[in-house]
Amino acid sequence: MKLYEISFRLILLGVWARFVSGFGLGVLLLSLSLSGLSGCAWTHTSNSEFISTEPAPIKVLIVDGQNNHYIWPKSTAMMKAFLEESGQFSVDVYRTQYTWRGDKLIEQYPANDGRVHEIVAEAKTDPTFAPEFAHYAVVISNFGWKAAPWPEATKRAFEQYMQNGGGFVSVHAANNAFPKWLEYNKMIGLGGWGGRNQKDGPYIYYTNSGKLKRDMSAGQGGGHGFVHPFDIDARKGAHPIMQGLPASWEHSEDELYNRLRGPAENLTVLATAFDDKKHNGFGRHEPVLMTVNYHQGRVFHTTLGHGENVYADPMFMTVLAKGVAWAAGATRTEKGAN
Ligand SMILES: [Zn+2]
């Protein structure tokens, strides 16, 4: 990673130390300035991008509570802390009444959503789960594999919120969740596991010669090789989320999701990673950062974020913050930059 290529401020985040004490002394983080998003009302950064700022921070809601990745209460807290420390976002958390996995981290990293929570052995639908989506510019999902379906009324409310121009960010195993919810699958574009296969849509990947493939061959949706560090290659450097980032950078040890499939409508692959066979991969350049335009809504989808080490990776968090800002509508994509 060539730091000089990136227009971010280097700041020491005291709050961060409590999360990353296991990763060494005095962790320096790259905090995103969002290309000057703080300070001025409108910044003309290039011919294809305007960044607008409101005096008030962007309102973000993280929803969570049921995820096979037991670190979820901590990864939620880490995302919230980073976004808020950037000065650009205010973040609330709304958690299912019934929580699944998460272990003792649920106590350590409470949602502070004023709701009563109960640990259950098998994920089940929380009939009281009804976030006020419309109060937020963007919703981040930290749900995961085997999360129980949301109540029907909440699903409809979320569809309405997105269709009317809401923002959504899908992080890692959030794309494992809700395989039978068609509108959700349209929002995330690609998903994995839960019985996903050719009935759900194509595989999307880049070939070695740089061609984007929509592959309708039969097969399961979702997989990954061994956890390992890998390079991320930008595919749409002009997109507001990608501007200021290097053409390629090394990502922390993580799962590299492969063979995701879904409707993939209005989907833009922003970046890929090569799923090397030597790490038990499939030899394709798999999408790891994507956007989806869903009616009037904007979706940023990152397949990254398996372990808590990833949430201490400044590049991951920086890209996440840029994706959240874009999904919130704070960075505007003009025609052609998509
Ligand atoms: Zn994972």
Image (cartoon, grey):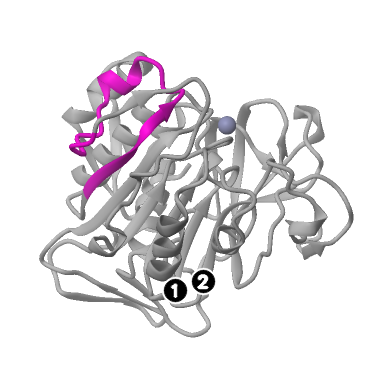
Front one among 274 and 192 = 192
Q: CA distance from mark 2 to mark 1?
A: 7 Å
Q: Which quarter of the frame holds ligand 1?
A: top right
The response on whether ligand 1 sits within 8 Å of label 1 is: no
- Mark 2 and mark 1 lie on one chain; the one further toward the N terminus is 1
Asked whether the beta carbons under mark 2 and mark 1 sit within 8 Å of each other, the answer is: yes
Give 229 or 297, whichever is nearer the viewer.
297
Nearest to the observer: residue 108 or residue 159: 159
Question: Of residues 223 and 85, which is closer to you in this image?
Answer: 223
Residue at 25%, 28% in the rendered image: 110
Name the residue beneath numbered marker 2: 294
Q: Position of residue 278 (x, y in %)?
A: 80, 29
Q: Which residues are magenta?
A: 91-115
Q: How many marks?
A: 2
Residue 126 in the image: x percent, y percent? 40, 40
Identify the disc placed on residue 163: 1
- Amino acid residing under circle 1: Gln
Q: Position of residue 191 (x, y in %)?
A: 64, 50
Of circles 2 and 1, the one toward us is: 1
Residue 200 at x, y percent in the picture = 74, 58
User: From the viewer's perspective, is residue 156 above or below residue 95?
Assistant: below
Q: Label 2 amino acid?
A: Tyr
The answer to whether residue 244 shows anywhere in this view is: no
Q: Is 275 situated left or right of 133 in this image?
A: right
